[in-house]
Every structure is written in C-alpha cells, then in structure tokens.
Amino acid sequence: MSDFAGNGDIQWCFSQVKGTLDDDVSEAFFSRPGKGQADIISCVEFNHDGDLLATGDKGGRVVIFQRDPSVPVLKPMELMVEASPRRIFANAHTYHINSISINSDQETYLSADDLRINLWHMEVTDQSFNIVDIKPTNMEELTEVITAAEFHPHDCNVFVYSSSKGTIRLCDMRQAALCDSHSKLFEEPEDPTNRSFFSEIISSISDVKFSNSGRYMISRDYLSVKVWDLHMETKPIETYPVHEYLRPKLCSLYENDCIFDKFECCWSGNDSAIMTGSYNNFFRMFDRTSKRDVTLEASRETAKPRYLLKPRKVWLLSWVASKTMVVPNVRTSDNQKPRAVVLESPNEMSSG
C-alpha cells in the first residue's frame, strides 16, 4: 500500500463476512467471562500485495475488504469457496497450538504450543521433530511460555519465537538440531521508573511477524506494537501505542482478566503499514513513513455493500444519562469488557 487508509487516497469499504452476525453473539461479549468475546479483533492480515484486508474476531467472524486497483476504493468481492482439509497431521502437542508457520522452502512448517515448537514435513503426517522445548523438569520452575513463532520469509533455517516475558528469540537450525539456545535475543530494557505490578503482564508478547523483506519484525503486546531491526537486539526502532487510554485502568482490567487478552498484528505488502486488532470491533493501522495512524471499525453496522469505513476517534468514556457530558469510566465488574465511546470528532464531546 503506497497510500494510507483513512488519511491518504486509499479508502476501505466492506466486502464480505464469513461467519455469524447473530445478535446473541455480540451481546454475549459483555456478559460472562469466556462466554462472549465476539467483538475482539484478534486476527488481522493483508494479502501479499495489499489489495485484500481481512479481520477476524473471537466470535468466529472474518470480515474481508478489497481494493479496486483502478480506483482507490475497495469494492465487494465474490464469495470464496470454503476450504476443506487435504491432510490431517498427527497430534504432537500437549497444549493448545498458538502458531503455525510455513517455511520458505515450501516443504516444511512449524507448529508451536506453550512449551514446544515442532518441525513438520508437508508430506509426512505422522511424525515431527522437536526443535524447541522449554518445559522444565519441575513445572513449578516454569517462568515463561511460548506465545508465537514464525519462520523467516527467505532464510529457511531461521525462525523466531516470542514469550510471555516480553522477549523474542531468533534461532538458526544450522547450529543445532534442538534450538534451546538462541542466536539473538530481542528485549527492551525496562524503565525502573515505570515499574508496576502489571509490567510483566502487559509486556507479554501475543504475536510476532517478520516483515516481507525479512529485515524487520513486529511484536504485539497488550498496549502497543513494536518494530524491531534484526540487526539491533537492544530495543525496538519504532513503537506504536494501540490503546494507550487503557493504561490508567490496568487494575480494573486485571480484575476482570481483560489484561490477558491476545491480539495479532501484520504487515502490509510493501512493509509501509502495520495493522493490529483492538476492542469493540476496532482495528488500528499505522503508516511507518508518515507516522499517521487510523482507527477503523469492522462491525455489524459496517457490514453493508460498499459501506465506506470512516476513521474513528476513541476515548474510554461513558455517557451520563443526560448525555450532556462525558466522564472517564471503565466497567469494573467481573463480567464486563472495556467499552469505549466512539466520536467522529472531539467537538462531539460537547453537550447535546
């Protein structure tokens, strides 16, 4: 994408939904914990050239947007055929699989769970090789878990995996069959002045992705997206806040377990933009060149043919009954997620 959605020439509009849009699914989002998380945009992805954009939420919906190459506006695309499995691979994981990544050699792929990463061959369904194992002999000594893993887009021997302690390890399979020792460790030093009870929790990385060029990678923690240069391990070269307005409310988010929610991130086709999910059907896009960002919404209201997505301004607010003012608020009961009032412009914060 050469132009930035919402602020440049390219604009996004609705194309199609894969999955349910039932009212009870969305309503459940604000009911009991674990029952409803439908409006969390947990998965986002561009295709290789940036013409297709997909968002997935925890309600099982996939919303797809498409851009017409001749006109800088997306147009609806025809419904795609549902996929069916060609091969079913054996169960080689004790815990839930959090990542699958196909190697650039197009012959192998990796799968990762909380404690192990396995290497598979496409043509061998009943056998895999363990390449990372962080399970301690005594589980009481466990201090971190694997949260995501991905192969390098060009170097078939290189992969990375992230952890719940906010670190990213780059491994080279040429050095050893079992990659328990890493080649590089990417970790941002903690500012002692900002240290709090929640520091380790919000620094946990939920997703990591190589850039298409293979020179950079992005990581997503609870509050931000960070860009790393593979040649610099000590700190990220760019940091983009996703929903910084939640920082003052971490205590409430911890009490209702929202602080443990996971979000994915991805690159545009030319690595010029970054996209990630947020709450309330929102997803954020950041332009690395202009440093502009935009918040867009993939919701039931936007699920109309050629509905043009409008940039949103978001504050963590709740209207009082008279709607004459707004007051800061995060719902703190155990069964509610953070809500946000969506305003078209700051002027709408006035009375009326």
Image (cartoon, rainbow, N blue to C red):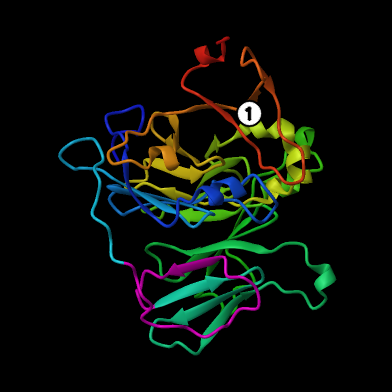
Look at 36% across and 30% down and name the residue there.
Answer: 6
- The x, y position of residue 19, in whole percent, is 42, 57
The residue that disc 1 covers is 316
Report the magenta stretch's main SS: loop
In this rendering, position of residue 276 left or right of residue 319:
left
Q: Is residue 344 magenta?
A: no
Q: Is residue 85 magenta?
A: yes
Give the magenta part as a residue range. 82-107
- As shown in the figure, which amino acid type bears the numbered disc 1? Leu
Q: Quadrant of residue 351?
A: top right
Look at 58% across and 46% down and name the residue there.
Answer: 27
- Mark yes or no: residue 96 visible: yes
| As drawn, 325 above or below 184 | above
| As drawn, 351 above or below 28 | above
Q: Quadrant of residue 70?
A: top left
In this rendering, position of residue 143 left or right of residue 164:
right
- Mark yes or no: residue 231 visible: no
Task: Identify the image quadrant of the N terminus.
Answer: top left
In this rendering, position of residue 72 left or right of residue 257:
left
Task: Identify the image quadrant of the C terminus.
Answer: top right
- The x, y position of residue 309, in whole percent, is 36, 34
- The x, y position of residue 286, in whole percent, is 44, 36
